[in-house]
Amino acid sequence: MTRDLLGLSGRIVMVTGAGRGYGRSLAHAYGRNGATVVAVDPDVELATGVASEVEELGATAIPIRGDMAVVLDVMNTFDKVEELFGTLDGIVHVTRADSKTPFLELLESEWYDLLNADVKSSLYVMQHGLRYLSGGGFVTVVLPPSGRNQPHVLSIRGAVAGLIEGTTQIFPENVRVNGIVPSRDASSSEYDQALVRAAVGLGSMVSEGIRGQVLEVLLPEPPQPPEIYDLLRELP
């Protein structure tokens, strides 16, 4: 698809968690499609690095250090965007915490880390997004992968999905709030293209009228490094 078909050229799009994984791939993709990218990450060096990469693709990008689970960081991030651009057309929020811990072994501290990094951050992004996107735009949330269905991970995904459903009821009709659940963790741009295309599509004009949806995206499994096969061959 061309930039004109997507309608992203000249749009101001914030990508959180942009320093690595899905966030980095999505920052690149929005830049390639003509958007000005606000690359937000708790690690300022990662945010600066991905902003430089986006600019090498021929787009405009700025880095902002911000942890979306910290309300002061969220406020400062949106204030900075308003100061620089005066407007915002879209937000891609990549939740950044997942758990491989079995349910019976889950500690309280890890549970609160999940709530902060995924649920609280999504709530803050949507709260401020409602203020900044009232003129129209989109919020797309990338939720924890569906491959892990431990009760605590399911409850986190359910809470974020509930925020998406609830905010859809109060956001103006010209603001689209949707979510994406990948089938696995981020790998590389090459193997994560299905998620990237879905997220860019939800932020483009081709998704007008699509609101309150949480889409599951099946991703191909990346090839294992050679040492994995060596270990497998040694198993009895």
Image: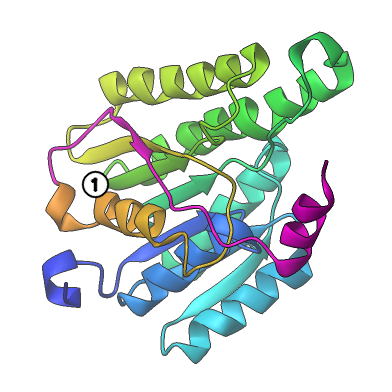
Q: Tell me residue 86's x, y (percent).
A: 41, 62
Vertical position of residue 201 compared to residue 97: above or below: below
- Circle 1: element type: loop
User: Residue visible at 64% across and 17% down?
Assistant: 150
The quadrant of the picture occupied by the C terminus is top right
Amino acid at dot 1: Gly
Vertical position of residue 97 compared to residue 135: above or below: above
Q: Give the range drawn in magenta.
A: 208-236
User: Residue visible at 27% across and 19% down?
Assistant: 169
- On whether residue 223 falls in the magenta region, the answer is yes
Q: Tell me residue 221's x, y (percent).
A: 51, 53
User: Residue visible at 18% across and 66% down?
Assistant: 6
Is residue 36 visible in the rendered structure shown here? no
- Label 1: which residue? 136
134 or 23, which is in the foreground? 23
* Residue at the farthest top position: 104
* Residue at the farthest front position: 236
Q: Tell me residue 235's x, y (percent).
A: 82, 45
Q: How crowded is mark 1: few (under 14 residues within 10 Å), some or many (20 or more)?
A: some
Side of 31 relative to 229 (left or right): left
